[in-house]
Image (spheres, grey):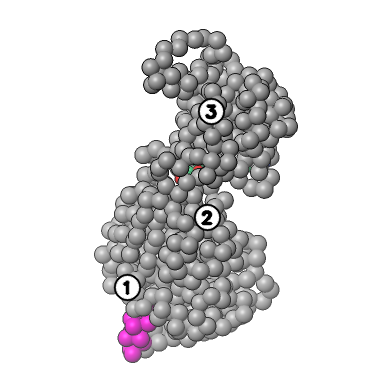
Amino acid sequence: MTSTPSAAREIPLRNGNGNGSTNPGEDLTRTVSSSFGTLDNLSKSPTATFHSTPSSYGGHQKPSTKQLKPFHTEDIKILLLENVNKTGQEILRKQGYQVEALKSSLPEDQLIEKIRDVHVIGIRSKTQLTASVLKHAKNLIVIGCFCIGTNQVDLKYAAENGICVFNSPFSNSRSVAEQMIGTIIMLARQIGDRSNELHQGIWNKVSAGCWEVRGKTLGIVGYGHVGSQLSVLAESMGMKVIYFDVVNLMSMGTSSQVHSLDELLKQADFVTLHVPEIPETRNMISTHQLEQMKQGSYLLNASRGSVVDIPALIKAMQAGKLGGAALDVYPNEPAGNGPHFNNDLNDFTEDLRKLKNVILTPHIGGSTEEAQSAIGVEVAESLLNYVNLGTTSGAVNMPEVSLRSLTLDEPNHLRVVYIHKNVPGVLRRVNEILGDHNVDKQMTDSRGDVAYLMADISNVNISEIKALYQSLEDLGSRIRTRVLY
Ligand SMILES: NC(=O)C1=CN([C@@H]2O[C@H](COP(=O)(O)OP(=O)(O)OC[C@H]3O[C@@H](n4cnc5c(N)ncnc54)[C@H](O)[C@@H]3O)[C@@H](O)[C@H]2O)C=CC1
Ligand SMILES: O=C(O)CCC(=O)C(=O)O
């Protein structure tokens, strides 16, 4: 169940990227067809106060919280891809929004068709929301990544076009760390091979090359949410933990930070990768790094497929340099489940599949009931808070801005959300427009080239909302204007 504090509703969902209609009025009617109908009706009574009636949506709200609802919620279209958990789907459906949920991701041409009219899209790690896809998303105001990684989204393009992006920063970290613990032991004991052999009827009781993990050194590359959880679990099994991170961090337990990747590679019996996909981490483990690793050591990657040069890893395995490896992620991954793990996907796949003591898993580090359910709730609530209240807390590509909810004892109040280019003079112009009313509270912040302003203003007649909106839209700095009332 959502704990979203109120159910404010957005009116103008205009895209600021120049792809939408040049007439904002047309955009309003096009994107949320009933919002002008409602607005026009209300505006016949210019002195009317606009307490919205208490909504049936989101049963947890305090009685005094104002429900902002200038259009029908069923006009909001949400597309959820990649089997987003039911918890998230239900929260969004309960709002009355139109939710379409698909089990897999979509090929680019189908994605472009679908993304044209949705206001909200929810994805996991596979769907690539590049600039060339997003430029077709004329109505899109927010993206929810129901996962940790956001490398699949062009965050800069999204921000510059007024599309806010949320993720779930740590709800699956524990699941990944636990999978790594299991995998470390499986590699050390060659359990994958023994199990495969026995499935084929072959009894192969061996101890050569099989080890306890107690007393061995685990080298963690990237000591963030996943890496630090793993550190604690590994120490509890008697492993010595060292880690390398570009940031100076507090060591958990008795683990210690080393100064370079090479230092870690030279000391560790197991090397495990938990860095984000960024240009600096592309192929961070390649031929040179594999050469630095100890003879018979093991490599694990559950970060992103681009972080390891897999053909180089295959060579190191074939040469007997490593004792084993485990991969959960690959440069190209299939859109959905099925018999897709072959050379059509990545041209090294058949060679990889032939290797002994190499555990291959289909990107399931975060795939547990606990993680997916928690992520569903967390990201769906971020989406609601953004759509309903304009709140950007936790956003990964916008400044974090929030104001307390409007309440029913505040008549003639509305909330203005103004996403704009971060250039001098904008605040003065915006406040000239808002200044005809009473600005009760205002917050503004910037992140790079984009700034986000949120203001609650009172003494606004219904008949004035459209003009207010239009004045903000007419400013050259405007990326996107939303008025919630
Ligand atoms: N296999 C799976 O199902 C999952 C995979 N992931 C992947 O794991 C990655 C890590 O996740 P978290 O620990 O939550 O991220 P995080 O952001 O909490 O930690 C990443 C750490 O890597 C460090 N780092 C960045 N660049 C580095 C570099 N060049 N060298 C060394 N350290 C560097 C950062 O300073 C940070 O401490 C995610 O970005 C995601 O791609 C996350 C969850 C599930
Ligand atoms: O579960 C997923 O779809 C993706 C997990 C992941 O890689 C992430 O959270 O970054």
Give whichever of 368, 251 is nearer the camera: 368
Query: Residue 415, image x and y in percent?
Result: 45, 72
Residue that mark 3 sits on: 354
Q: Residue at x 54, y 23 (%)?
A: 356
Q: Position of residue 159 (x, y in %)?
A: 57, 63
Mark 3 lies within 8 Å of ligand 1 (Cβ measured)? no
Query: In the figure, is residue 175 to the left or right of 74?
Result: right
Confirm or deny contact between disc 3 and disc 2 (CB under 8 A).
no
**Mark 1 Cβ inside 8 Å of ligand 2:** no
Which quarter of the rendering shows the C terminus? bottom left
Q: In this rendered view, identify the residue nearer to me: 446 or 221.
A: 221
The residue shown at (43%, 19%) is 197
Whether the residues at callouts 2 and 1 have beta carbons within 8 Å, the answer is no
* Residue 199 picture quarter: top left
Q: Which mark is residue 128?
A: 2
The residue that mark 1 highlights is 72
- Quadrant in the picture for residue 310: top right
Q: Does 285 appear above or below 373?
A: above
Mark 2 or 1 closer to N-term? 1
Q: Nearer the viewer, residue 24 or 107?
A: 107
Q: Within 10 angstroms of label 2, few (less than 14), some, or many (20 or more) residues?
A: many
Q: In which of the image's four quarters is ligand 1 placed?
A: top right
Question: For residue 305, which quarter of the picture?
Answer: top right
In the structure shown, which secondary structural element does the residue marked by tag 2 occupy? Answer: loop
Q: Nearer the viewer, mark 3 or mark 2?
A: 3
- Of labels 1 and 3, earlier in sequence is 1
Numbered disc 3: secondary structure: helix
Amino acid tagged 3: Lys
